[in-house]
Image (tube, rainbow, N blue to C red):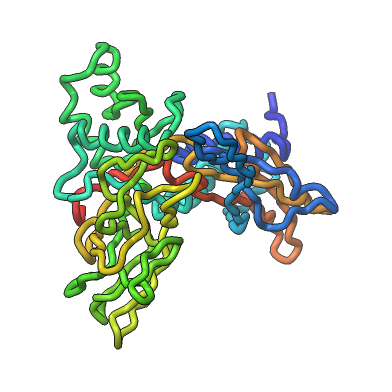
Amino acid sequence: MANTILTPTMVTRKALAILHSKLNFIGSINRQYDDSYAKTGAKIGSTLKVRLPNEYTVRKNATLAAQDTTESSVNLVMANQWGVDISFSSVELTLDLDDFAARVLEPAMAVLASNIEAEAIKMYVDVWNTVNTAGTDHPKNLSDWLAARGRLNECLAPKDGNRFFALNSVAMAAIVDALKGLWNPQAAISDQFRDGVMGKAIGFTWLENDLILRHTTGTRDNSTPLTDGASGADQDGSTIHVDGLDDKCTIKKGDVFTIADVYAVHPETKQSYGYLQQFTVTKDVTVNSTTGDADIEISPAIVASGAKQNVSNKAADGKALTFIGDGNSQYAQNLAYHRDAFAFVTADLEMPKGVDFAAREVYDGISMRIVRQYSISNDTFPCRIDVLFGCKAIRPQLACRVQGKKNE
């Protein structure tokens, strides 16, 4: 019996299912879908606003102190229209769907998934919490991962079954080998031996992902960076001014540092945790070669009072900045996170008219469009597969980097 001719919808659904199965990291984070793009006359522009939870302070006496509710949000830009372009004939559409998927869709979706996944993992630069900061060895001890768990707890990450570790194969091998004899029940040990991965443990699902990026730190030789407020004033906000930098010093987006005497606090009670707050650099820094000064844009912004307070005090003048890791070195950025730390958003692309073959499908928050057209000039059927997406660390405090070994 002849095979049924595959329809555009069948092909699109299969392609989307293959893509989804390969998105290891994206599959574990908040996936949002917006259909406004596909509605004529209802375009929302290229930026979505993602609402964040409201924050308040507690009154500790009998006097009423009403607080305004100020909604806060972060902007998520839908700037990435990525795809893969292939060509297949009408004859190939008479294949069995599984055969067509293996020959045409599987290799196309593999490369598309890898590139989209790698782009999403770049969100690590927005995460300021960092453990295993020495980077002298792979995070192979349970204490390394428990430290990340503790940091998420302190930042009030929900304990709702949506916590994940994403780590590369080297880190996965190290932790499985180190802990292979310590886990029960027996089924879990069997799974580790058979698959070489941790599965579920200490309240997290462990994901092996070899697209985990390595961060290259800036060069900081001969520099002793100090806070340098105008006229000696304390500093707060999302930019700090520093001096004491060598004219050849570089500070890179994603570098993490602490400031002396600026401590992290509990998000609700505002009591100090007793360790220094960590900050991530949000933009590459240009050092004034004459004065050795620079403005460093940071996240989180320094807030020393009110409902959004996140540190014990402002950054006083002349306080030392201590960067995590050695200068000009690479460290794998394994991640511990709650699902809602990051968002991956897709939107429908418009469907063109007058083409040979077109379909659009949505699966688990991911929208994909396929369009094929006949080219009379060379007698071919070029086809494009597109995904319009954006990604953003919307609540980066719910994530933590678990640094890998230096330069490995």
Give the camera-side residue of 222 and 243. 243
- Residue at x 60% of width, y 38% of height: 16
Residue drawn at the location 29% of the way across and 75% of the way down: 243
- Give left or right: position of 261 versus 47: left
Q: Quadrant of the N terminus?
A: top right
Image spot of residue 358 (x, y percent): 74, 46
Q: Is residue 142 left or right of residue 340?
A: left
Tell me which residue sits at (27%, 50%) in the image. 276
Whether residue 250 is visible to the viewer of this picture, yes or no, is yes
Which corner quadrant of the image does residue 204 belong to? top left
Count numbered badges in the picture: 0
The furthest residue to the front = 62
Task: Give percent across and percent down for residue 91.
Answer: 67, 43
In the rendered view, would you say 375 is above or below 102?
below
Q: Is residue 345 left or right of residue 380?
A: left
Q: What residue is at 22 percent from the left and 18 percent from the top?
A: 183
Is residue 27 something one can see in this rendering? no
Residue farthest top in this picture: 186
Question: Residue 391 location, x and y as percent?
Answer: 54, 50
- Nearer to us in this view, 228 or 24: 228
Left or right: 195 as drawn, with respect to 1? left
In this orientation, which residue lies closer to the viewer: 328 or 232? 232
Q: Is residue 377 above or below residue 200?
A: below
